[in-house]
């Protein structure tokens, strides 16, 4: 059944000139039929090179919006309209504008997990894999980092020469992991390498052997280690177990399940390809152009 749907999707891709992009958190049956898969930075960079007329973005809304900003001439479809990142909506643009008014000497760095409206009032975007390089490459010293306090604190600690104020937002999924989860996991698997996403809280990251984006975690586990504790969304440990069956990949905590990233099914992708499901992303020109500036700055500083 799944194979049949996958075959129909592969046929429709050719017939309708559609590319499928999938974030690494998507399910294996979607990753299998994707033209490109990766973390949010890789997907943004790929977006600029696509020659197709339509892109189906399997992930959450801010990822589809970013594609639309970079490729306005393409039709961009999000297969499930309600798939969003709760962190992306944690601050209103008005609060950032108020901060900028009171602190004109600060540049605002936004994690890419933000709405288009929020990006439009920020200076530079970053992703988990590019944040360190980009903030370090910025000539400005005074920086407001929004919205993720955990990624922001991680960057602040790595770059003591910068004056970074960190907003108090977070990913509710990663932020729920505790030190006690780390102690339990280490006790159960004392020889495993612990790979962690920087959206985890500071006290949890202290237990990490390697800290990196979803792609960095996958690449490290595939290249180096056969026994790993995976400190990010469950899909990554599941994926690694599938592609490296001789390895042992454990989830750091059962709490690491993102409903929004898991909501898209292969059937939703099929319906989006047929034109009977999903939502076409429409961004009004003024908003799109304003929101694109920090994304372009990200690609320039991160390249
Ligand atoms: P990446 O930057 O690793 O793609 O992570 C995005 C994300 O939403 C993690 O929760
Ligand atoms: Fe957003 Fe967290 Fe889900 Fe990533 S895991 S999409 S940051 S809620």
Image (cartoon, grey):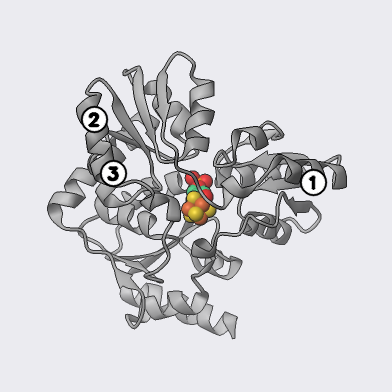
| Residue at 31% from the left image edge and 34% from the top image edge | 124
Looking at the rendering, which quadrant does residue 191 occupy?
Answer: top right
Residue receiving disc 1: 185
Q: What residue would you read off at disc 3? A: 119
> Could you classify mark 2 by the number of other residues whose Cα lies within 10 Å: few (under 14), some (14-19), or many (20 or more)?
some
- Residue 14 lies, with reference to residue 225, above or below; the image says below
Q: How far from the left and from the top, in percent, is residue 184?
A: 81, 46
- Neighbourhood count class around disc 1 (C-alpha, 10 Å): few under 14, some 14–19, many 20 upward: some
Q: Is residue 242 left or right of residue 98?
A: right
Q: Is residue 72 left or right of residue 12?
A: left
Outermost residue on the top side: it is: 161
Residue at which label 2 appears: 100
Instruction: Indicate which disc, 2 or 1, sits on the residue closer to the N terminus.
Output: 2
Q: What residue appears at the point 55 percent right and 84 percent down from the top-left corner?
A: 4
Q: Secondary structure at mark 1?
A: helix
> Separation of disc 2 and disc 1 at Cα?
43 Å
Across and down, in percent, residue 170 comes to 49, 44
Tell me the distance, in whole angstroms, between the alpha carbons under discs 3 and 1. 37 Å
Q: Earlier in the sequence, mark 3 or mark 1?
A: 3
Can you tell which of label 3 and label 2 is closer to the viewer? 2
Picture coordinates of residue 294 (x, y %)? 28, 38
Please indicate, yes or no, whether residue 265 appears anywhere in the rendered image.
Answer: yes
Most foreground residue, 105 or 37: 105
In the rendered view, tell whether residue 194 sits above or below residue 44: above
The quadrant of the picture occupied by the N terminus is bottom right
N-term mark: 3 or 2 = 2
Q: CA distance from mark 3 to mark 2?
A: 14 Å
Q: Assign a secondary structure to mark 3.
A: helix
Horizontally, is 284 left or right of 224 in the view?
Answer: left
């Amino acid at each position: 059944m799944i194979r049949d749907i996958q075959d129909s999707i592969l046929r429709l891709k050719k017939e309708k000139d559609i590319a499928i992009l999938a974030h690494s958190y998507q399910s294996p049956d979607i990753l299998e039929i994707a033209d490109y898969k990766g973390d949010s930075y890789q997907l943004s960079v790929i977006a600029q090179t696509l020659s197709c007329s339509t892109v189906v973005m399997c992930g959450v809304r801010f990822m589809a919006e970013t594609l639309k900003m970079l490729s306005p001439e393409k039709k961009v479809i999000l297969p499930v309209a309600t798939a969003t990142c709760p962190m992306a909506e944690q601050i209103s643009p008005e609060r950032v504008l108020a901060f900028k008014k009171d602190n004109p000497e600060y540049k605002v760095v936004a994690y890419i997990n933000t709405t288009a409206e929020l990006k439009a009032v920020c200076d530079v975007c970053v992703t988990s894999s590019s944040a360190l390089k980009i903030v370090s490459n910025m000539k400005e010293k005074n920086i407001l980092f929004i919205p993720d306090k955990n990624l922001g604190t991680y960057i602040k600690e790595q770059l003591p020469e910068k004056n970074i104020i960190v907003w108090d937002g977070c990913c509710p999924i990663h932020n729920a992991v505790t030190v006690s989860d780390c102690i339990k996991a280490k006790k159960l698997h004392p020889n495993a390498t612990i790979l962690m996403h920087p959206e985890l809280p500071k006290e949890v990251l202290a237990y990490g052997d390697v800290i990196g984006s979803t792609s960095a975690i996958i690449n490290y586990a595939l290249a180096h280690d056969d026994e790993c504790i995976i400190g990010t969304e469950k899909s990554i440990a599941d994926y690694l177990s599938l592609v490296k069956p001789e390895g042992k990949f454990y989830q750091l905590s059962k709490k690491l399940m993102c409903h929004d990233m898991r909501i898209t099914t292969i059937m939703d992708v099929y319906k989006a390809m047929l034109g009977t499901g999903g939502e076409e992303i429409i961004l009004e020109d003024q908003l799109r152009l304003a929101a694109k500036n920090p994304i372009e700055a990200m690609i320039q500083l991160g390249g």
